[in-house]
Image (cartoon, coloured by chain):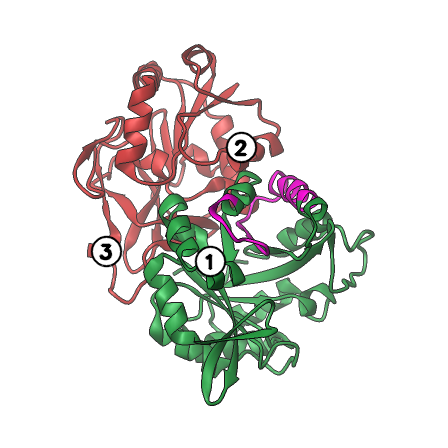
Chain colours: A green, B red
Amino acid sequence: MITKRIIPCLDVKDGRVVKGVNFLGLADVSSPIKLAEFYSQCGADELVFYDITASAEGRRLFTDILTEVASKIFIPLTVGGGINTVDDFDRVLKCGADKVSVNSGAIRNPDLVREAAQKYGDQCVVLSADIKRVDGEFRVFAKGGREDTGMEAISWIKKCVGMGAGEIVVNSIDTDGVKKGFDLEMLEAVCDAVNVPVIASGGAGGIDDFTKLFKALPKVDAGLAASIFHFGEVQIKDLKQELRNNSIVVRL
Amino acid sequence: MIAIIDYGVGNLFSLKSSFGAIGADVIVTDSEEKIRSADKIILPGVGAFSDAIAKLRATGLDKVLIDEANKGKPVMGICLGMQMLFEKSFEYGEYDGLGLLKGSVVTMQDVIPAELKIPHIGWNALIFKQKDCPLFRYIKEGDCVYFVHSYFAENCDESVAATTEYGAELTAAVAYKNIFGCQFHPEKSGEVGLNILRAFCETEAL
């Protein structure tokens, strides 16, 4: 049985991890390399790095860091943020990323998904979608959740899977930051629509939220979160043990 | 010295780094001379079988690899590299492999339930078929490794060293005399993966 994956997400700006990280016993908590090592040792199944810098200098720093992380951490790495062209795929894959996540870049140019999938394989292309309920439907938002694209989310996701997206990150804007659990209704709608791995994001407040997620929706493959891991509210080891106690298959 | 054969397929950065992490002396090379002088050879590979085997043959290094393997040098194929060690692949057609191992590579579509997703991507547990396989010296049955594949090796009873359960038992690792292979990615399988590479580094020529 394939295991359910637990994925911490690190936002990197100008070479440092942002969103505030608060770890006991970790001297340099904003070093992406130290944090990546820490998570890898704790049993994270994969790491996601989002490059949220806007400057060319920041981007160069990001690729340097990615190269260093990939030379030290031997679990799958996914990279997102600022991916607009096939050249951007090339840039981060050469640094040792295994998968590349696209969001606004695919909204601006949906062919990016097709071109990248043809060149690097479906398994390499992750579609990340920021979704919010508007007028009774699921709507795709762009620019970090600030702009309503007017597109209905399920049909957008189906279209991208048809073009070669090999995995979907569903980030619910409605539950993000609320810490009252994942958006099960939204996730179920996505799981019913596609047959590629679905990663739940947005809303995890504690261990129980992951248990509820995998119990309610066995088709969800992974749970992604940032702050609850960064602030030490949830230890990945404890989380995975609790999942196993609930008969959910995880890698310990 | 371990030679990772560079024949223009895929990214060898992580593979090279992972050998570096366990202190192995490793080189990524397309030089016949260096491959012949290495103690062990790694055949990597990602992408489509037909494309990869054609590229390998175009370099002429397929003959070098077979020759060195026949002399008893330890060889390990990784992912598509493992599949290439077999006699045939039926990925989008029918193609000859290197024939170092008996068996063929087929789609998992016909053997796993329709509701399971293809590719088989993620961490899955190893079921040992050869308890004393040299590759497993530092790991235990049930340890998880990271897979990304849509095809698998069958009719390989002679060499299968471990399988994994994904709606069916799929070949996960092979070992026969001095020929080894991993369907999964040891360079992406954390400590367990590094321990498999470490064990391979300690295998001896026949």
- Give me the C-alpha separation between circle 1 and circle 3: 22 Å
Q: Which mark's residue is nearer the viewer, 1 or 3?
A: 1
**Residue furthest to the bottom:** A136
Marks 2 and 3, how far apart at CA: 33 Å
**Which residue position holds label 3?**
B109
Q: From the viewer's perspective, tell me whether residue B61 is left or right of residue A23.
A: left
Instruction: Residue B198: give its label.
Output: 2
| Amino acid under disc 1 | Val
Question: Is any part of residue A82 visible from this angle?
Answer: yes
The local secondary structure at tag 1 comes to strand
Q: Residues within 10 Å of mark 1 (few under 14, many from 20)?
A: many
Q: Which residues are magenta?
A: A60-87
Residue that badge 1 annotates: A126
> Which dot marks residue A17?
none
Residue at (35% x, 69% y) in the render: A194
- Measured Cα–Cα span from mark 1 to mark 2: 32 Å
Residue A83 in percent (x, y) is at 54, 53
The x and y percentages for residue A244 are 52, 68
Residue A233 placement, left or right of B81: right
Residue at mark 1 shares a chain with residue at mark 3: no
The chain ID associated with circle 2 is: B
At label 3, the amino acid type is: Gln
Q: Answer yes or no: do the residues labelled 1 and 3 have beta carbons within 8 Å?
A: no
Within the magenta stretch, is there residue A86?
A: yes
The crowd level at tag 3 (other Cα within 10 Å; few <14, some 14-19, many 20+) is some
